């Protein structure tokens, strides 16, 4: 309810300004300064809540710490678990919101109605007064008022010239603009009593100004006061116009007209607005906890503390792990809601006690535990032990994730060729040293790479292997002819991944991007991806009617133990085919299939057959598909990364972070795109737009998927810190959802 907090804070400031006016300025005769003070108060009161001085807040030191890795959780392996959703209920926030909207609509409707009534009066016959102002005669009326350039006066008004002189002051001073401005603020803050008090005081100041200047044209103030007293019972005009006849203000107008004029030093009182502004600005920063302060007049500079690498620390949050043992279902969520005997129950993992968990398990018949997950990735946290500790060798240790990079699409084939060709130099592996080489080359009209030059290089042996591989590239590049710059980066698992080319080089139009090599990839390991499924277990297959198997393969009787022996003996009558148990093992070679049907009920004597030796039937397991099909994932994420753009507004504001999207695949098409978490509306909208407009066929199984999109800003040689992600959608129903590779979008400053 940030909107309500903002309005309340703004009206508190308006009340403070008005209180200062009543205590120190209400009886001063510097009416023009009083008018300026009230208008200034109305503006500043609504600006202060969105302004802050971050330098006043205590600055948290930035500490660099060792990376802690998170274990990838493939949600696609989880069946769907559904927790009963409670019936939507109207909360107090909903009541306040709709009440506020209703009040604003009523106030705005009243303003439009009054303006409409005035517009009807302006259609009557009018004449120019003094070749500048529009004078409208109201036949048979005893009233006089003005609105902007229109002066309305009744034919029954006495001493019309004096009244016209009074109303002309309102017109020349632009008092009607003040009234409309306050009326608009009243639409926004219709619930606040301070805006009505400010409007009343502002109207009084308008009348004091007009009376003062009109009395100066008369013989003396006493004569004009007598005129006001004798004409106090005229008809008032429109509430949004300045009416000469205002009985409620008559006494105060006469008093202020005959009061002694304030001295010059009294003007210094109006400077009280300055310390008031400073004090309320400090209060806005220190007292109010808010996230709608868009203007920072004095940003705080974070101080970097010393680097700590002793203990790997990851910011974690609490999540529920919900297990249904009956249905063999597991789900994860940061909150849990259900209805028990008609009453909505909501529990949050961060504040749930042991008694709450016992109640949930008893009521919902589920097993619930609270676990720690990474605040950004929402994955369970796993801290790898030190090198001296015993580590399960079957669990591959992940290396630090590299910074984001990009590569133009025409050079994907170049990257694939170089990855197959280049091997890490032995001297670099021995020294455990990273490397990088920046090349310049020319593309001719046919797309051939020529005139290769080394601009920069780092690391022993990398320049030679990279240069040779690039020179040997035999295929054309489908891009316009011209000079290009390419960087190759060689990263080892235990070293910090960095770039060699500077920001200026990357901004050159001919820079095509980076090709990244790491020693894990060269060994066939793909980092940050779920492992492929294990091989299929041996199956026992019975020989039943109509089963297709491969024909036996006859081999020479060399080694009796080489293959199992199946003896086929002649029989007189076969009632059913015998059942044979066979261990199915995958092999490379395949043979044509034949069909073996059971023998007929009665058969003639078959000829004698010698015992033969046959290999078991061949069954080749299906290749893994779906979320484990790395080619399908790679094509999908590459195309998605190509279409996502970094929003200009987020780049200029220095906003970086991660957006988590959830979507479904049906008939190889993307649908039902939902933003699960994000850091900025522009970043979230751009990621959602790119995914919703994804047109190529998706080589993934039908179902639900998660895809994280990371936005990064490279400023010089360092990355702008990422903003913490905020949940945008809290779902209590977790379907079978699979996690895909991260898409990285990088820009430069």
Image (tube, helix red, strand yellow):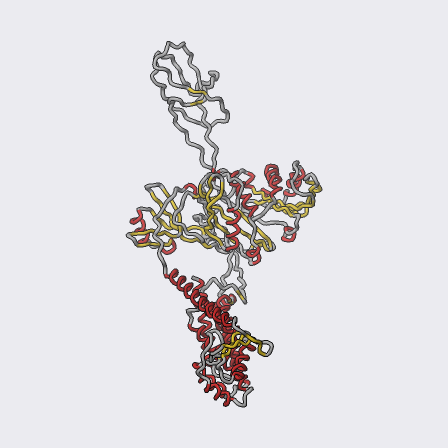
- Percent position of residue 725, x then y: 48, 54
Of residue 131 and residue 580, the one placed in the foreground of this image is: 131
Left or right: 561 in relation to 327: right
Left or right: 598 in relation to 35: left
> In which image quadrant can residue 174 be found?
bottom right
Q: Is residue 139 above or below residue 462?
A: below
Q: Quadrant of the C terminus?
A: bottom right
- Percent position of residue 558, x then y: 47, 17
Q: Is residue 579 above or below residue 48?
A: above
Residue that protrudes farthest toward the left in the picture: 341
- Percent position of residue 468, x then y: 66, 39
Q: Is residue 367 above or below residue 157?
A: above
Whether residue 403 appears in this view of the structure is no
Which residue is at a point 37% across and 10% down the rendered structure image? 604
Q: Quadrant of the N terminus?
A: bottom left
- Percent position of residue 186, x then y: 46, 70
């Amino acid at each position: 309810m940030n909107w309500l907090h903002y309005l309340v804070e703004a009206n508190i400031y308006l009340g403070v300004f008005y209180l200062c006016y009543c205590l120190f300025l209400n009886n001063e005769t510097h009416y023009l300064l009083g008018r300026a003070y009230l208008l200034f108060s109305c503006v500043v009161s609504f600006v202060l809540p969105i302004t802050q001085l971050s330098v006043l807040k205590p600055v948290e030191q930035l500490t660099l710490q060792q990376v802690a890795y998170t274990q990838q959780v493939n949600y696609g392996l989880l069946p769907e678990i559904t927790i009963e959703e409670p019936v939507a209920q109207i909360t107090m926030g909903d009541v306040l919101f709709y009440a506020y909207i209703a009040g604003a609509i009523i106030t705005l409707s009243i303003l439009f109605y009054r303006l409409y009534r005035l517009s009807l009066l302006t259609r009557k016959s009018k004449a120019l007064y003094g070749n500048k102002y529009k004078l409208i005669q109201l036949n048979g009326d005893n009233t006089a008022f003005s609105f902007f350039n229109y002066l309305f006066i009744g034919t029954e008004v006495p001493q019309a010239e004096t009244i016209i002189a009074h109303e002309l002051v309102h017109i020349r001073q632009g008092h009607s603009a003040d009234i409309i401005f306050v009326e608009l603020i009243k639409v926004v803050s219709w619930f606040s009593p301070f805006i009505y008090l400010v409007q009343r005081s502002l109207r009084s100041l308008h009348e004091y100004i007009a009376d003062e200047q009109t009395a100066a044209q008369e013989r003396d103030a006493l004569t004009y006061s007598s005129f006001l007293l004798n004409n106090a019972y005229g008809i008032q005009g429109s509430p949004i116009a300045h009416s000469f006849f205002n009985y409620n203000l008559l006494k105060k107008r006469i008093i202020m007209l005959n009061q002694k004029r304030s001295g010059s030093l009294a003007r210094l009182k109006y400077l009280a607005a300055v310390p008031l502004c400073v004090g309320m600005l400090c209060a806005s920063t220190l007292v109010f906890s808010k996230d709608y302060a868009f203007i920072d007049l004095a940003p705080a500079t974070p101080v970097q503390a010393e680097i700590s690498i002793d203990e790997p620390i990851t910011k974690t949050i609490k999540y529920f792990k919900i297990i249904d043992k009956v249905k063999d279902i597991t789900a994860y969520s940061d909150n849990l809601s259900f209805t028990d005997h008609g009453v909505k129950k909501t529990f949050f993992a961060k504040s749930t006690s042991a008694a709450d968990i016992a109640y949930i398990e008893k009521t919902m018949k589920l097993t619930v535990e609270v676990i720690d997950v990474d605040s950004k990735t929402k994955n369970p946290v796993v801290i790898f032990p030190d090198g001296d500790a015993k580590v399960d060798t079957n669990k591959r240790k992940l290396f630090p994730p590299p910074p984001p990079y990009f590569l133009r699409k025409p050079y994907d084939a170049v990257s694939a060729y170089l990855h197959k060709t280049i091997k890490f130099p032995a001297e670099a592996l021995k020294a455990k040293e990273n490397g990088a080489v920046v090349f310049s080359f020319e593309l001719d009209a046919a797309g051939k790479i020529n005139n290769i030059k080394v601009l920069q290089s780092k690391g022993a042996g990398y320049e030679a292997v990279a240069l040779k591989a690039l020179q040997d590239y035999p295929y054309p590049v489908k891009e316009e002819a011209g000079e290009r710059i390419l960087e190759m980066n060689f990263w080892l698992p235990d070293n910090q991944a960095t770039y060699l080319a500077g920001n200026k080089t990357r901004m050159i139009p001919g820079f095509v991007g980076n090709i990244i090599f790491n020693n894990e990839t060269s060994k066939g390991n793909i980092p940050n991806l779920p492992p492929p499924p294990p091989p299929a277990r041996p199956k026992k297959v019975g020989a039943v009617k109509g089963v297709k198997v491969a024909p036996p393969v006859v081999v020479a009787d060399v080694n009796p133990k080489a293959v199992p022996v199946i003896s086929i003996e002649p029989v007189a009558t076969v009632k059913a085919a015998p059942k044979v148990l066979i261990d199915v093992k995958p092999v490379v070679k395949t043979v044509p299939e034949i069909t073996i049907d059971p023998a007929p009920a009665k058969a003639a004597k078959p000829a004698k057959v010698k015992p033969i030796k046959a290999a078991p039937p061949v069954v080749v397991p299906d290749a893994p598909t779906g979320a484990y099909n790395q080619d399908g994932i790679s094509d999908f994420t590459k195309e998605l990364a190509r279409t996502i753009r970094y929003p200009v507004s987020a780049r200029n504001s220095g906003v970086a972070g991660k957006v988590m999207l959830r979507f479904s695949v049906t008939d190889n098409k993307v649908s039902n795109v939902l933003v699960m978490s994000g850091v900025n509306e522009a970043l979230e909208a751009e990621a959602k737009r790119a995914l919703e407009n994804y047109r190529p066929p998706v080589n993934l199984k039908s179902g639900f998927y998660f895809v994280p999109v990371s936005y990064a800003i490279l400023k010089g040689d360092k990355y702008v810190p990422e903003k913490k992600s905020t949940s945008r959608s809290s779902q209590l129903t977790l379907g079978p959802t699979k996690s895909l590779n991260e898409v990285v979008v990088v820009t430069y400053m």
